[in-house]
Each structure stands twice: as C-alpha cells, then as structure tokens.
Image (cartoon, rainbow, N blue to C red):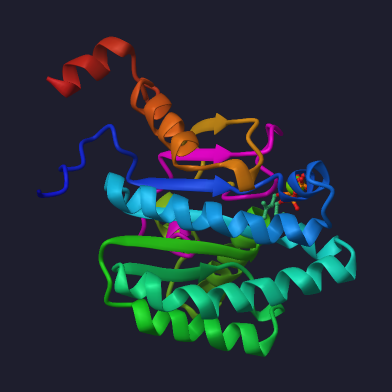
Amino acid sequence: MAAPKPTSVVPRHVAIIMDGNGRWAAAHSLPRHAGHRAGLKSVRSAIETCAKAGVEVLTLFAFSSENWRRPRDEVSLLMSLFLEALDREINDLHKNGIKVRFIGDLTQLSTALQGRMRDAEDLTRGNARLTVLIAMAYGGRWDLTQAAAALARQCVAGTLAPDQIDEVRLGQELALKGLPDPDLFIRTGGDQRISNFLLWNLAYTELYFCDALWPDFDDAELQRALGQFASRERRFGLTSEQRARAAE
Ligand code: IPE
Ligand code: IPE
Ligand code: MG
C-alpha cells in the first residue's frame, strides 16, 4: 500500500529539544550518562515517526553552546556517545533514505567527531526522504552572531551594501538556510523555555511542551504532539476570517 500523502496539517519541519535524560537516569537510580544512552532509542523512534508522517525536516538539539559548561566527565561521555551512535546508526539511516546534516559551531568538536560528521553528510547527501539536522555545539545567539559577521565581511568586500541587508539576506547566512522554518517545536522534560535554540527561525513556530522525559518520548508521545499541531490555527498576524478565506 502506498504511504499516505502528507497534508498541510503535517508539519514540514519539526524541531525538538530532547530534554530530561539526566532526570530519567536519576529516577532509575542510574548515572546521568545512562540517561543519554537511553535517549538514543527515542531519537530512532522520532526519526522513524517523522519519516512515516511525511515530515521533511527534523532538527534535534543534541548539545548546546551552554552545555560545554557541564562537568568535564559528562561532556566527554556525551562526545563518546555521539561518536559511537553515529558509527552504529549511519548505515541504517542511509538505507532508510535519511539525509543527515549537522549545524552548530562544529569547530569546537574533536577532529575525530568532525570527520565522522562530514562522512555522514557525504554518505547521505543524495537522500531525499527526511532531512535530520543535528544541532551540536549550537546556540541561537551564536547562529545570529556568525550570520552578522558573514554579512559584515560581504560589506567590507564590497559585494553587499548595508541597505541591501533584509530578513531574507540574514536568513541566508543562518544554519537553517535553504530550509523551511520549524512549524512545530517540541520540548520534553517539563521545562518551558527555548534555551538558546533556533532564536530567529522559531519566530512563528507552534510551541509544544510536554512532561515526558526524553528517553520516555515514544511514538505515541510524538503522535500526540503532531495531533495537537494539526488542531491549531496558525494566523501569522492575520484574523481568523482572513485565514479561512485564504484556505477556500
Ligand atoms: C538533555 O538532557 C541532553 C543534553 C542537554 C545533552 P539533560 O542532560 O539536560 O537532562 P536533565 O534536564 O538534566 O534531566
Ligand atoms: C537544552 O537542554 C539543550 C539540549 C537539549 C541539547 P538543557 O538541559 O541544557 O537546557 P537548560 O540549561 O535546562 O535550559
Ligand atoms: Mg536538561
């Protein structure tokens, strides 16, 4: 049977803050890194559910620019886990038609990890089913700052005039360039904040917060979020009447 055609109620782009691994581990009397490891199952499940639902882009916040401040042991165990998970999962992802890309201040990562990330991007570049963006050493403020610097360099080089800078130009220098803005943002773990995720691109995103800790965030949890999204009216500044007329 052919896969159901995605409709407009399916978000094109889902962005997730995968939070609550440490609390999940504590609740199971395990060390924090066991929580990060348990979270991998939810990563696999979210990718599968999004691919089946017809989502085009899934952005996963794996490590923030602020997470470098965590205890050195935790950071180094997380980095080993990223390397291990990438090595173990990349062939399956490729076989399933997933395009993998990384965004963030990747130069901060070890050369080994940077190399594996490039290999994963090269391997999956031609895939078209679902793009999975993994945000690593990413911060929304870093993203805006590097975009500002790129535009300034173009002005200094004489290829851009300051008054040519508009929202489109700035957007073209951000990590999500060429991709639609997230339609649906999900944060697990109960906290209701953005934590320096995609500050520019979340301007009109529907926000969804849930209490489930990331390792417990399964297909049913994601379906609930997708269902909620489908029931919302996105007005983008217009009135309900204008939206209804536009949909006719
Ligand atoms: C999210 O889980 C994973 C990363 C930030 C890398 P946490 O490690 O933040 O888990 P909690 O919030 O302490 O439970
Ligand atoms: C946000 O989670 C970053 C990731 C999930 C990678 P944190 O757990 O670091 O967020 P805060 O510090 O509680 O806001
Ligand atoms: Mg957290």
Measured as percent of width and height from the top left, residue 100 is found at 42, 70
- The residue lying at 38 percent from left, 21 percent from top is 232
Q: Is residue 207 left or right of residue 36?
A: left
| Residue at image location 37% in from the left, 25% down from the top | 234
- Based on the picture, tell me whether residue 178 belongs to the magenta stretch: yes
Left or right of 175 on screen, residue 36: right
Residue extending farthest top: 241
Residue 163 appears anywhere in the view: no
Q: Main secondary structure of the magenta part?
A: loop
Q: Percent from the top left, x then y, of residue 221?
A: 49, 35
Q: Is residue 42 left or right of residue 160?
A: right
Work out whether residue 174 or residue 16 is closer to the camera in this orientation and state it: 16
- Image quadrant in which you'd find residue 212: top right
Q: Quadrant of residue 229?
A: top left
Q: Residue 245, position in %: x, y?
A: 17, 16
> Does residue 240 appear anywhere in the picture?
yes
Write down the quadrant of residue 10 in the picture. top left
User: Residue 27 versus residue 174: which sits nearer the camera?
Assistant: 27
Residue at 77%, 49% in the rendered image: 25
Where residue 230 sits: x, y (%)?
34, 27
Q: How many marks?
A: 0
Q: Which residue range is magenta in the image?
A: 170-198
Q: Nearer the viewer, residue 199 or 69?
A: 69
Q: Quadrant of the C terminus?
A: top left
Above or below — where is 46 with respect to 223?
A: below
Q: 16 or 194: which is nearer to us?
A: 16
159 vs 58: above or below: below
- Magenta span contains residue 83: no
Left or right? Give the position of 54 relative to 132.
left
